[in-house]
Image: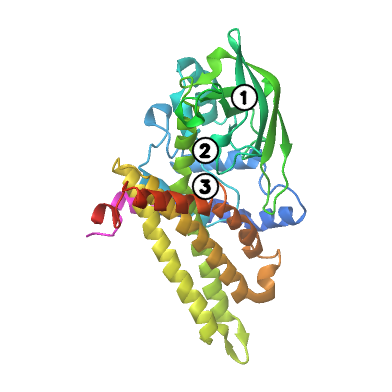
Amino acid sequence: MDFSLSDEEKAVRDTARTFIHKEVEPLEQEVLRREREHRTGLDRSELRELQLKAKQFGFWGLSTPQEHGGMDLPAVLQSLVWTEVGRSFVPFRFGGEADNILYFANDEQRREYLVPTIEGERISCFAITEPGAGSDAANIRFTARRDGDDWVLNGEKTFITNGNDADFTIVIAVTDRDKDVRKGGATAFLVDRAMGWRSGFIQTMGEGGPASLVFDDVRVPGRNVLGEIGQGFDLAMRWIGKGRYIIPSHALGIAERALRMAIEHANTRHTFGRPIGQNQAIQWMIADSEVELEAARWLVLRAAWTVDQGIDPRHTSSMAKLYGANMVNNVVDRVMQIHGGMGYTRELPIERWYRSVRLLRIFEGTDEMQRMIIARDLLRGYTQIGGHLA
């Protein structure tokens, strides 16, 4: 069994690492300074400039099909690249991407929504979560009713990433009250902000924040149905599912960078006449962090490999998301402890990570939902202990 990366995988990973190190990491002190002043760490024009620089490195549209100018990377390679992005806390992401379910758009919708999003001319957001429907996505109450050739949308969505910046949203609405949302009762719509919905900022413990979206009799043309009527819940699960190996991939990069900081500090910080790294308490925190980091790495890569093999990835992705999110929280907590009072200040990124990684255990499937999925798959015989190696 060969656990090594191929030459192509190494080359792509190393190029991504070089870009993050040369172009993104130098911005870190300025980002921290702005955030201490309660300003945005990176504005849209600066993000766009970085994305275009990344394009010169060859990184544009990691998951975007080649017919749309993207790289169409396998899941394993995407995972490796997202790990490199995670090494810096600068709020950067590669350009040339669009929501995966936008590829269900028809030709007219692709011209109006998909292509401009890939090219960076439009910003989208995905909206399914509601005040009464978070983990229980099938409990959505947001409605869309027919009115001639149009649909009229009413309700509220909450905790929507990019909701304050987006000029259009992909919103999931109940279109048939007589059907289960999971079995044809919900539909996806492409809704421009200009059609009348409004957003409000939600303050969180992390930097930036999601939005609430409010729809009061927002009229949407029938041509703006994404996919088929009744396909909304299936599309929503496809959207959510992708993040379950990307999120812990990003967590790996955070944990690696934070642990490296802890090792350096343990070797250079002296108390009682010797480096604190000679103390068993510090050594055990470093050792536990390394073990958990490596365990998470293989769970994440296995989940991505499963995607590439065309195997149903839900079980492996849930394990990767559950363990990876908890791992990075554990590692960052230990790194803060090793740094002592300095780790608690805003002079270093540790307290920022401490706040931001807590979200990983909540969004796009809470820990509890992942545990439910994993247990259900085993109890019902959908999978077996040991997976494909059993």
Badge 3, how many Cα within 10 Å: few under 14, some, many 20+? many
Q: Which residue is mark 1?
A: 143
Left or right: where 145 falls relative to 178: right
Q: Position of residue 182 (x, y in %)?
A: 47, 31
Q: Picture quarter containing residue 176?
A: top right
User: In the image, what residue occupies the spot 30% across and 42% down?
Assistant: 311
Q: Position of residue 263 (x, y in %)?
A: 52, 74
**Camera-nearest residue between 118 and 24:** 118
Q: Nearer the viewer, mark 2 or mark 1?
A: 1
Residue 365 circle label:
3
Contact check, label 3 and label 1, Cβ < 8 Å: no
Q: Which residue is mark 2?
A: 95
User: In the image, what residue occupies the spot 42% across and 38% down?
Assistant: 63
What secondary structure is found at the residue carrying circle 1?
strand
**Camera-nearest residue between 175 and 273:** 175
**In this view, 272 is above or below 38:** below
Q: Indicate the amino acid at tag 2.
A: Gly
